[in-house]
Amino acid sequence: MKNQILHWINSAVYFNCILFLLSCKNEMLYNQHVLSELEGPQEVRIESQHNQVAVSWNPIAAADGYFAELSKGPSFVSTLRQSDTIKNTKYTFEGLEANTAYTVRLRSISLTSPSLTSKKQVKTFTTAAIPKEDFVPDIVVAKDGTGDYVSVQEAIHAAPVNGAQPFYIYIKSGTYKEVVEIPQNKPLIHLIGEDKETTILTFDNYSGKTKPGGGTYGTADSRSVYIKGDQFVGERLTFANSAGMDAGQAVALYIDAPRSAFNDCKMLGYQDTWYGHNGTKSLLENCYIEGSVDFMFGGSSTLFSKCQVHSNRTGGYITAASTPAEQQYGYVFADCKLTAANNVSEVWLGRPWRPYAKVVFMDTEMGKHIRPQGWHNWGNPENEKTAYYAEYKSMGEGADISSRVSWSHQLTDAEVQQYTKEKVLDGWEPTFLPENVRIVTKLNK
């Protein structure tokens, strides 16, 4: 009798366990059924501006909330930002970049069963460009007579003496063949071109050319544009010397201003295109500099950032620095690209015009036209003891350092920290026009 009672008890326990397992299985099947029925957000709508996006959608009856994720790019790769649980049917992502592709991913969720989610809905969009802001320059120069002056130099004469605020001179498209000089008593001059490809300041003087009043030009006074006024800024302009390849030394742009800055400009010439005088500090961003021999020379402290440096003659030298011995920085190239005309080869990175020349190339792409040795001593072995030539993470066909001259340097990660924009320019931060500026002249306002 005792054994029979135990058998009944065991049978009851086994039966209850079976019922419990069946119940669990049914609940799992129910949950799977709910999961398959929970819809994703429907009719997703995008309202984007240059810096944010508002995403909205139609409500889902079975959903207790929603979840949104944002990825940068035309497809969802990785989560850049994400929301908490969204109780309504709209969400805004802020702090986006203008004119940039993003992808939003949405799903419905259940608060009572957090494991339940819907299929994801994906929507790609592109933020708008930054809205244009009108800007009225102080003076307009136009060759066709539609401005205040037809000559750039006339406009500079009209600028205030010893001005305390930036003075903006807008130059419409055209080739202005004239020698331009910004004197020392005209600081804070901003020359803004309509387009660097079509707004050209040029002349054709060269060293040895006869002057109109007698005598001949030297290297320094062969310049097309001469800048002495402090805190000069040039944008969207071409500075050129059109004397030609065989003219010898012919300067397109001579910098004698304590501080100057250039953005989106072109400097065109052959020998001695760009001259930065001793003690000056300059910034060139997104510029194109072309030449044949020593086409960036002088004793300035200059940062070339994201510039294209183009050689137009075989066997030339890109730099000829004459950095004073006591000066910490010479020419610093960061994130630049060294290119050359067809069939140009055997180009040197630089040679020392003066013994303590300093030139550094950082993260720069070098074409195959660059000589494997890299640097030249200007025929004087003593210069090897004093000149400072260095590279950091050069790349491209001309970047193989295995054959570089033994007296050049490869910077370490710690050493390269000395060459920041702030340090090279000694804390000066020049101001360029914002990208969204629309020039409005007084005549068409």
Image: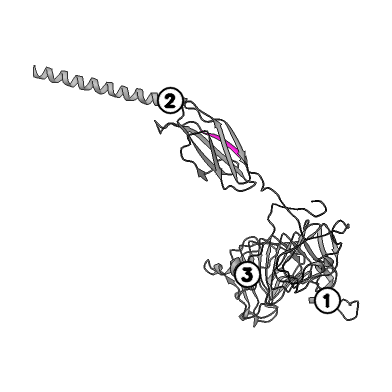
Which residue is pictured at 69% across the width and 70% down the height?
Answer: 348
- Who is closer to the viewer here, 370 or 211? 211
Within 10 Å of disc 3 (Cα), the crowding (few <14, some 14-19, many 20+) is many
Q: Amino acid at mark 1?
A: Ser
Judge whether residue 79 can be spotted in this image.
Answer: no
Residue 240 position within the rendered picture, expressed as x and y whole percent measured from the top left = 80, 65
Q: What residue is shown with label 1?
A: 207
The stretch of residues the image draws in magenta is 120-124
Instruction: Check the image and report above or below for 85 versus 270.
Output: above
Amino acid carrying mark 3 in the image: Leu
- CB under 8 Å between discs 2 and 1: no
User: Which element is circle 2 on?
Assistant: helix
Alpha carbon separation for disc pair 3 and 1: 31 Å
Left or right, 153 with respect to 367, comes to right
* Residue at 68% across, 82% down: 380
Residue 34's mark?
2
The residue beneath circle 3 is: 425
Seen in the image, is 246 located left or right of residue 89?
A: right
